[in-house]
Amino acid sequence: MPFQRVSLHSIRSSNQRALATQWNVLAASAAFPSIGGFQPQAAGHSLEQIVLWDVAPTGEMDGRSFRVRQVGLRASEAFGGEVIGKTMEELVPPALRTISVNGARECVESGCAIYEIITTVDGNAHQVDCERLLLPFGDGDIVEQIVASLQLISFQGTVERQAIRRDFETGPQVAFSGMILSDAMARLGPKALALRRQHAAPSIVPAPAAQELQPVLAHAQAPEIQGSEKRKAARRTAVKTGRIRFGKTTENCTVRDMSPGGASIEVADAMNVPDRFSLVLEMESAARKCSVIWRRERQLGVTFG
């Protein structure tokens, strides 16, 4: 599937959208930014779902390899086993290899963010979407690192991260492929993108600046009690974003308050939402079955189960 030019608003996940927005702001006057000022946590993104790839030259005809420098816990579970220092070709199952490598190459050659939705069916015949966001970083002319954010979504049940790798090996389908220009690149016009592709050469070396993310990602790999306590506190004081699904309709929503048994949800039009639907919260893969107990113009009170 060819990469079509899309905007930041095409990104379904609000956390991934915030991540891409930070990348765009950091780009300022360049096609893409250096990685030094990049702070995923400031965008509200879980570091557990991030992979940091070094882009390096090879003697092969394609000229590039993508090698893992750092990986978050959840992304590591999807790959399985030890991944640091391994290449994309070594880690990605054969059925996904072309999809994955093509996206990374497009990210390097265009200097654009790449957003893809890859779908499969798990062992319970449930559709699972992998929303993949690739962000290029470097000196503004040569892409030296790619930050990848991976998010698994299923509206029909819990995603078993250890098993989902096998499911994506059988029959992955690309449902969406988009490229997002930074505002700086967009201002330069289409000729700038064409020129960048023409001069994008595989003479790329890993940059020391990538080390600045290392201690942050390493901290995310350890499931410490302190991080768990912070997440629980956030649920009491901050709103959560998510998506509701009924029939073939999917709609963004905001969870204003939440308890183990239910929640108050804000939607665009509560009157158009049926009495039963599924809810998936950002940064979670499992869907909750919801039953409406009260509704107002833009709010729903629901119980889970």
Image (tube, rainbow, N blue to C red):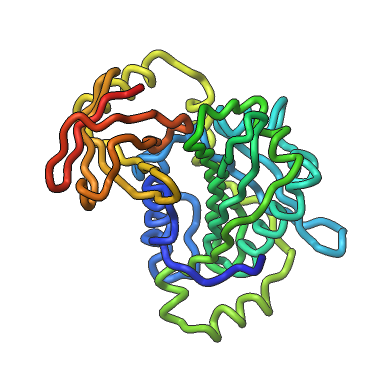
**Which residue is at a point 65% across and 43% down the rendered structure image?**
120
Residue 279: where, in percent of width, then height? 37, 35
The image position of residue 288, as x and y in percent, is 39, 29
Q: Is residue 38 visible to us here?
A: no
Q: Residue furthest right?
A: 60
Q: Residue at x 44, y 76 (%)?
A: 186
User: Residue, x 44% and y 16% (percent of image)?
Assistant: 224
Report the side of 85 relative to 115 (left or right): right
Q: Residue furthest bottom?
A: 191
Q: How many marks?
A: 0
The residue at the far top in this view is 225
Asked whether, in this view, residue 108 is left or right of residue 35, the answer is: right
Relative side of 287 to 165, left or right: left
Specify whether residue 296 is in view.
yes
**Is 35 located above or below residue 220 in the figure?**
below
Q: Position of residue 77 (x, y in %)?
A: 63, 27
Establish if 197 lies above or below 163: below
The image quadrant of residue 106 is: bottom right
In this view of the protein, which residue sits in the foreground, 13 or 276?
Answer: 276
- Tell me the quadrant of the picture where the N terminus can be found: bottom right
| Residue at figure coordinates x 69%, y 47% from the top left | 172
The percent position of residue 230, horizontal first and vertical second, equals: 31, 22
- Describe residue 109's horizontal placement relative to residue 266 as left or right: right
* The C terminus: image quadrant: top left
